[in-house]
Image (cartoon, grey):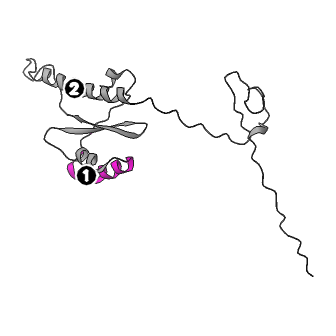
């Protein structure tokens, strides 16, 4: 299924849990992800052959879609073509279409937040020069632009004048 999305969807994970385990463990996992209570109920309870899956983007829930768990065989055990293969393929196409609709509607992912520089670490531009101190990428000196401002040191003892 992931091959249909050409890098836009890297992994689809599907699992079947026993109903009691799904409700206990799944409730906690979905709550930690911030999934709404209505969606949690749909994801955790079976409705016949219908199952629901949660689509995540950057570890954030974006959609609940209906999926199914059936194996598609090209031929049956007797060697004849599986009569349900076309029906299952059509259902797979429908699920892929729904996922594609969700992926198209989403705005592009936000870039990761910039990492804070450690004291003495350079912030090199693509040209190889530090944006803060101007040194080259081969410098062995610490960057003075990222040094922390040290608070004035207090003496251990203070002079107390008595009248």
Percent x, y of residue 55: 33, 36
Label 1 neighbour load within 10 Å: few <14, some 14-19, many 20+: some
Q: Which residue is mark 2?
A: 94
Percent x, y of residue 103: 35, 28
Q: Quadrant of the N terminus?
A: top left
Q: Earlier in the sequence, mark 2 or mark 1?
A: 1
Instruction: Report the magenta residues as a range.
Output: 15-34
Asked which secondary structure carries label 2, the reply is helix
Q: Which mark is residue 23?
A: 1
Instruction: Name the outermost residue toward the bottom.
Output: 163
Point 24% across, 39% down: residue: 52
Asked which secondary structure carries label 1, the reply is helix
Residue 79 against residue 116 in the figure, above or below: above
115 left or right of 22 in image: right
Foreground residue, 139 or 116?
116
19 left or right of 134 in image: left
Percent x, y of residue 99: 30, 29
Q: CA distance from mark 2 to mark 1?
A: 27 Å
The secondary structure making up most of the magenta span is: helix
Label 2 neighbour load within 10 Å: few <14, some 14-19, many 20+: some
23 left or right of 58 in image: left
Answer with the quarter of the image where residue 120 lies.
top right
């Amino acid at each position: 299924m992931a091959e249909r999305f050409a890098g836009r969807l890297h992994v689809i994970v599907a699992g079947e849990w026993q109903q009691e385990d799904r409700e206990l463990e799944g409730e906690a996992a979905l709550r930690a992800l911030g999934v709404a209570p209505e969606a949690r109920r749909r994801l955790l309870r079976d409705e016949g052959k219908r199952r629901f899956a949660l689509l995540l983007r950057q570890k954030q829930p974006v959609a609940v879609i209906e999926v199914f768990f059936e194996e598609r065989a090209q031929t049956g055990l007797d060697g004849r073509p599986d009569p349900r293969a076309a029906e299952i393929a059509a259902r797979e196409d429908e699920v892929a279409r729904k996922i594609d609709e969700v992926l198209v509607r989403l705005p592009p992912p936000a870039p990761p937040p910039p990492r804070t520089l450690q004291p003495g670490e350079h912030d090199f531009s693509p040209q190889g020069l530090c944006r803060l101190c101007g040194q080259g990428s081969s410098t062995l000196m610490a960057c003075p632009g990222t040094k922390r401002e040290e608070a004035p040191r207090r003496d251990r003892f203070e002079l107390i004048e008595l009248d």
